[in-house]
Amino acid sequence: MREENKLIDRAKSGESKAFGELYDKHLSAIYRYIFLRVGGRKADAEDLAHQVFLSAWQNIKNYEFRGFPFSSWLYRIAHNALIDHYRTEKIHLDIDKVPESILVDSENLEGVIDQNFELEKVKVVLQKLEPDQQNVLIMKFVNDLSNKEIAEVLEKSEGAIRVIQHRAIKRIKSLLSAQGGSASGGEKNGGEDITTTV
Amino acid sequence: MEEKILQQLYKLRSVKPDQSFVKKSRSLILGERNRRVFALPQFALPRFAFAWSGAFVVIFLVFALGFLPQFLRKPSFSSLNASNLNQEFKNLSINIELRELSYQQTVSQAIASALTEISDNQTPHLSPSLLEAEKNGVNLEEFSDPQINELLDQIIF
């Protein structure tokens, strides 16, 4: 934390190398958050992630520490970028396949295929949730942010975040029940079907 | 079921950007800032935009207030004033007429004088005796010039 603050100070004074280190440290998490929020569309995720860090670099002099990590500021920029994105862009309903290049630790082809299939199902489920529910689940369970940090990013209370999380889980269960599947299922009913293994 | 959902969400932590994208985006972002910093001097930065706009407004007002009275005033060029021009034309024709009158009077007097002298035999400078006396008084040899004589000979002969 102290090391990051030094990097931020150096970046605020215009040192591009320092911002480069911040970029390396936070890009993956921000990209992952955006990637899942845009339904796994790689091109959109890359464009938005680029915009987020470009905006951060151009406005880093305005950044002030308010008791939250630097990543919260980046998440807020990303959150606003996503709002603008969905406000101006047509929402795509089709879900792209997860490219193999985004997966790591894939020891064999069978494992990669299984992992792709499972991830695809998770992405489909996420897309059926409300934006705030997606935000909370991704930030908390994928990117490991605390409720306090999520509340700061989304400008809500911690209690509201807990409620949103609870409703998101409940909604996923409801979606799965509506499909009539079970944990051992695997039936597919078209592009947006959800199997009960999720 | 909830546990399975969370397990699947945890698996999404494996999502990572392409390295080619990372390299390109990184260099573009850091290059962008460097271009901005080096391309624009301090006074051109956005935080000075308000000051600059204020300064331009003040300069404009100074010029506008300075030149406004002159724009509102009627043209004061005497040469373009209609009444002055009329007066000038009137005076011009009178002057021309007066000058012509004076010239004609002088010419008339000269002609009358010449006619009088021609018709008058008593005019002293046309008197034969007076001319004869003047001829005798002139020493032609004294003012003779060989070149003039030569030229006169060529003309006469």
Image (tube, coloured by chain):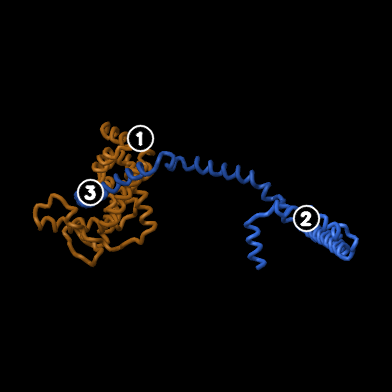
Chain colours: A orange, B blue
Q: Residues within 10 Å of mark 1 (few under 14, many from 20)?
A: few
Quadrant of residue A93 in the image?
A: bottom left
At x 88%, y 66%, the residue is B119
Q: With A115 as the anchor, is A33 left or right in this view?
A: right
* Helix, strand or loop for disc 1: loop
Task: Tell me where residue B134 appears, x and y as whole percent.
Answer: 81, 55
The residue that label 1 is drawn on is A65
Q: Which amino acid does label 1 sit on?
A: Phe
Nearest to viewer (mark 1 / mark 2): 2
* Helix, strand or loop for disc 2: helix
Q: Are marks 2 and 3 in contact (CB under 8 Å)?
A: no
The residue that label 3 is drawn on is B23
Q: Mark 1 lies on which chain?
A: A
Q: What residue type is labelled 2?
A: Asn
The residue that label 2 is drawn on is B84
Task: Tell me where residue A80 appears, x and y as whole percent.
Answer: 37, 49
